Image (cartoon, rainbow, N blue to C red):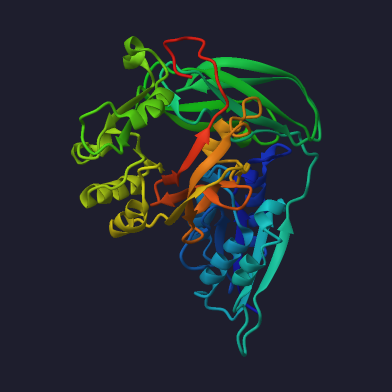
Amino acid sequence: ANTDVAVVIDHSLASGRQAGAQTVFHKSIGMLKQVLGRLQSGDTVSVVLAQAHPKALDSVPLPAHSHTAIRHKLLTRLERLKPGLTAASIPAAIAKARDVLSLGRNSHKAIFVISDEQAYNWQADDAGAWRQATAGTASTGEPPLKVFDMPLPRSAAASDVSVGWLHVAPHIVGVHRQVLVTAAIHNSGPGNFSNLPVQFSVDGRLVSTQTLAALAAGKTQTVEFPVSFNHSGSHWLKVKTPVVDALAADNYSMGAVRVWRRLPVLIVDGQMTSVGSFRRSMFLRAALQPVGRRREARTFIQPKVVSVSDAPAQQLRHYAMVILNDVPELPGTFLRRLKLYANAGHGLWIILGPHSGPLLINQQFPQAGLRLGTLTTVAHVKRSPAVVIKRKRNATVRLLAAASRNAIVGVTLRDWWNITKLNAHDRVILATSTGHALALERAVGVNGGQVVRGGIKLVMPPCKVINPAESC
């Protein structure tokens, strides 16, 4: 019987893998030609590319006898394409092919899938994707839709080296401040590599090269490249292994960093007016800028301390983050601006102290459209409980609890505000061993905004000031 035929071709990153003298993708085109050569004149044909978003080369099936249309609309377009650079979903491509076949004129339908059967693309464990791909494939009185797997013949596989994601530490990068770029180099086999060069480039300029003496099949090694930037702004990074292997597309990995010349931080002190010395924020400012007066203008972090009355006059867009340090209350207009500020992707850190109270968190912030949990009472204890880390990946916790200098271990905890979570959006960062939350975080907006809040009175272990011009 005449049949509407759809051919799904793998156009993922894996389609660039060398299979002998050709790539998997170009071998797929050869197999497509074999399928076309066996169609009957009453059949129709369409081609769907399996890629990040499945794509049909034509909106309707083409008659099999229309050789000119097939040549120009299908084969010529495919031969001009290069192998894909994205992930792919075979079940999603089958669902797309089913939609195209619904426009065909024949009652019989068939789908042929041409690929080298990479397990990642077939998503065999994703039952939901396969239910969606095959749903409604048969209706009353009509033959069921048939799906055929046409695997490409396997050739002797060459070894493949791949470069993983780039990681930059620390995450906040400043001008003339050294950072470490790391990447994992993996050899999927079957052969081994020796004297494998790894190149590191910044903005297209080769910075350094390392050589891995040996990388056995199935093994991974991590390479590290220290780098500093002379100019602020956006910079792109690239780690590459210039070798000839089975898949050239995964021989490099790229990333981007934003480099800051200065990191301005606004500290709103709980002091109501600008008259005074902002005693509550002296330690905080010294921690952010631990240098003498003469060197303050050259430090990376530039803190500015203002009073509650002066806060509304500040232009928040000029600051990378805002810290509310033991603030009892704030004007409603300023709080609404803080919400928009966090929604735009900035950070807001609320430090609760002896002058704080439920008014700001329980009433004023909700009225401004930002609910941040509930404050109840202040807990006072004679025997200090242990501080438990609930989110080890939190950026602040990672710095405080580093293996060689864990500052949390020596903390003696005396007083803290009892903070109650509102919902699952509130995540506890630190808690007492008795189960009380000490610090919470919440993502705000869709641009990476973050609000962290907590209030504890700490007695830190004694420390020795080596340089009198610097803060302990």
Q: Residue at x 39, y 47 (%)?
A: 447
Q: Horizontal placement of 440 versus 24: left or right?
A: left
**Is 275 situated left or right of 447 in this image?**
left
- How many numbered circles are shown? 0
Q: Residue at x 40, y 29 (%)?
A: 284
Q: In which quadrant is the N terminus drawn?
A: bottom right
Whole-percent x and y of residue 14?
65, 45
Q: Quarter-wise, where is residue 95 in the image?
A: bottom right
Residue 449: horizontal and vertical position, in percent? 40, 46
Residue 416: horizontal and vertical position, in percent? 49, 45
**Residue lying farthest to the bottom in this orientation:** 141
Above or below, 179 relative to 79: above
Front in this rendered view, residue 264 or 24: 264
* Extreme-front residue of the structure: 382
Where residue 9 sits, quadrant-wise, is bottom right
Near-viewer residue (121 or 245): 121
Image height of 95 relative to 361, above or below = below
Residue 3: give x, y in percent of width and height.
62, 75
Q: Residue furthest left?
A: 313
Look at the image and tell me whether residue 259 can be seen: no
Q: Is residue 453 above or below residue 129?
A: above
- As rendered, which of 181 and 126 lies closer to the eye? 181
Residue pictured at 56% horizontal, 60% vertical: 47
Closer-to-camera residue (239/469) = 469
Instruction: Please say whether residue 200 is visible from this viewpoint.
Output: yes
